[in-house]
Amino acid sequence: MVSIIDYFEERVQRFPDNALIWEKQDGIFQPTTYKEAHEEIRRYAAGLISLGVQKGDRIALLSEGRKDWLIAELSILYAGAINVPLSVKLEEANDLVFRLKHSDTKMVIVSEFQLDKIRVIKEELPLLEKVIILDETEALENELRWEQLFQKGEEVIINDVSILNHRISEVTPDDIANISYTSGTTADPKGIMLSHRNYTANVEQAFSFIDIPAHFRTLVVLPWDHAFAHTAALYAFMYRGASVAAVKAGKTATETLKNFPNNILEIQPHVMMSVPALAKNFRKNIEKGVQNKGKMAWLLFRLALAHAFWYNGTGDNKGRGLKKLTRPLGYLFDKILFKNIRTAFGGNLKFFIGGGALLDIELQKFFYAIGIPMYQGYGLSEAAPIISANTPTFHKMGSSGKVVQNLALKICNENGQEVAQGHSGEIVVKGENVMSGYWKNATATADTIKDGWLYTGDLGYVDKSNYLYVLGRFKSLLIGHDGEKYSPEGIEEAVVDTCTLIDQFMLFNNQSPFTVAIAVPSADGLRRLIKQQKFDTEDEKAIFVLKTIQDELNQFKKGGKLETMFPQRWLPTSIIIAEEPFTESNKMLNSTMKIVRRVIESNYVEELEFSFSAEGKNILNQKNIIATKNYFN
């Protein structure tokens, strides 16, 4: 077993002059070699020790993806501490405060763009001793600039380097490297404890069916705290002596994305990580560019795509049988069309690795057709995160790829019993990449890890060729279009407890543009509401009820008295009124009176589809008016 420090030290010895990180400075991308990064890391780590950082202390990292993000994390680990990586999308009012308090964070390393978030909440964090600023800006009381930390470390190394060396020697593979906060309600997010060995084991597993040459580069457009980018990009490329590049950071995510088109041409990456939202945006821009060239170009492009879809099949059966006779046609289409598209991605891009959420098979076919396959993988933050992946050698579009080596996987039914191959159930895994547990949450740990097996909460099956198919959620996680996950129970319970007109409430988001709710009105609440009212028609009565339901739900939204309870993105945009209550007899409740999400979703397929339309987003739509009348008698 090896720690992250062990394997980085070995890579510095093997690839001292290889570029580790590329960052844009003074208008051009500048490399930092493995040897140069190593020297910086040791000094920053020594600086942290000089500030009193002890082994096992938690230090939070809040920054856009950049060179110093990786340098800071490795410095924290070299100091024997634990990194608490935080998303720049977090809101200071609730999200940040909880995570920093819950993790007992002692110091925060923060970029200038995120600094105000920390300054606003400093007084609410009694354990916070120091704020370290990555950029050249004025430091206030108990704040320190990044270059000042470097100087402190330099002094330690000059005066007594054994202090640093001793601390490094104390770090073991089983020590916690990260506490990463992911899904959970705002009142109780879970901190995933990942050890050094969890990461190094998962990096080794990542190369089960793929290789990355040392000269390869990747441009990391995903947030660096994202579990997928963290392992599949930063650590996996480091493992092979390859290099990572940061998209030039802007003050906002939108500003950063605007820099991406130029940065990709400058870096000319060989591999990139992608999530569905990014893939959809790429496709949209590609098609828009072709359409702008005229009707003939668009017609030819559609013809080329149709041929490629047919010729490629699901990837594993590409060009078989009589299809191979049309290979010259495919070559011609590629030469006059697809090759030009690839140039816009820098010219070197071999493939994308897709993760974070399930990638639609049509998107997979599209990128395969233009000659830059997007190989879907599957993972979970609790598994560090890679569980399976499609690769250039082994791939089948529609699947999430082959299960990585040195990882046991089984599919279990609702009683925890393993089912036969080809049957669906909960995906359960066991291996060295499985987390140590949830920070200060023994109950959640025991519910998720049983006898060393991680119960993922995702639904899937494995085919006879060992390809994993992920079908959605086995448990109740919402999954946003960008792969972010969130547990809905807290919102659902709060709505039922607070809203007098709602008896049952279920949220739905399966990589959708927004969250939808299916609501069962309270018959008693409706009777009390309309008792003193007079209506000319049943429609008028239903509209009044629906408006009141919307008013009750608006308490949780911006401007409402409960607006700080939950992140706004997970509150429902559309409301579906259920035709009947959820009961055991219609199998929408189980024997313990918990809602059975898969049954409810399957019964409301048409309504869910309608809810994403302009008409469906209006709670006063005709479907809801008709459904509401069911509760008047």
Image (cartoon, grey):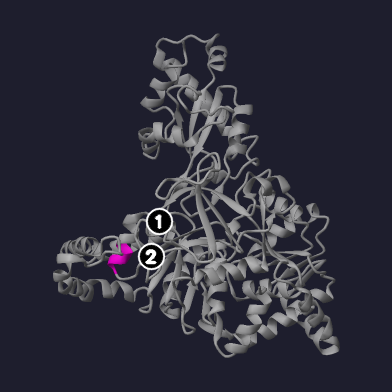
Residue 361 colored magenta?
Answer: no
Q: Disc number at residue 598?
A: none
Q: Residues within 10 Å of mark 1 (few under 14, many from 20)?
A: many
- In the rendered image of this protein, does residue 313 appear above or below residue 579? below
Q: Disc number at residue 374?
A: 2
**Snapshot quadrant of residue 251:** bottom right
Q: Quadrant of the N terminus?
A: bottom right
Residue at position x 82%, y 70% in the image: 53
- Read off the magenta span: 366-370
Q: Residues within 10 Å of mark 2 (few under 14, many from 20)?
A: many
> Could you tell me residue 445's position as x and y percent?
68, 49
> Could you tell me residue 231's position as x and y percent?
56, 68
- Visible residue check, residue 487: yes
Q: Main secondary structure of the magenta part?
A: helix
Write down the residue under mark 1: 359
> Could you tell me residue 541's position as x and y percent?
45, 15
- In the rendered image of this protein, does residue 489 appear above or below residue 343? above
- In the rendered image of this protein, does residue 165 appear above or below residue 632? below
The one nearer the camera, 6 or 517, is 6
**Judging from the image, what secondary structure is the residue with disc 2 in?**
strand
**Judging from the image, what secondary structure is the residue with disc 1 in?**
loop
- Visible residue check, residue 135: no
Residue at position x 38%, y 20% in the image: 626
For marks 2 and 1, give the CA distance.
9 Å
Specify the amino acid type for callout 1: Leu
> Could you tell me residue 518's position as x and y percent?
48, 31
Residue at position x 76%, y 53% in the image: 101
**Snapshot quadrant of residue 59:** bottom right
The one nearer the camera, 22 or 134, is 22
Q: Earlier in the sequence, mark 2 or mark 1?
A: 1
Specify the amino acid type for callout 2: Met
Q: Quick check: marks 2 and 1 in contact, CB under 8 Å?
A: yes
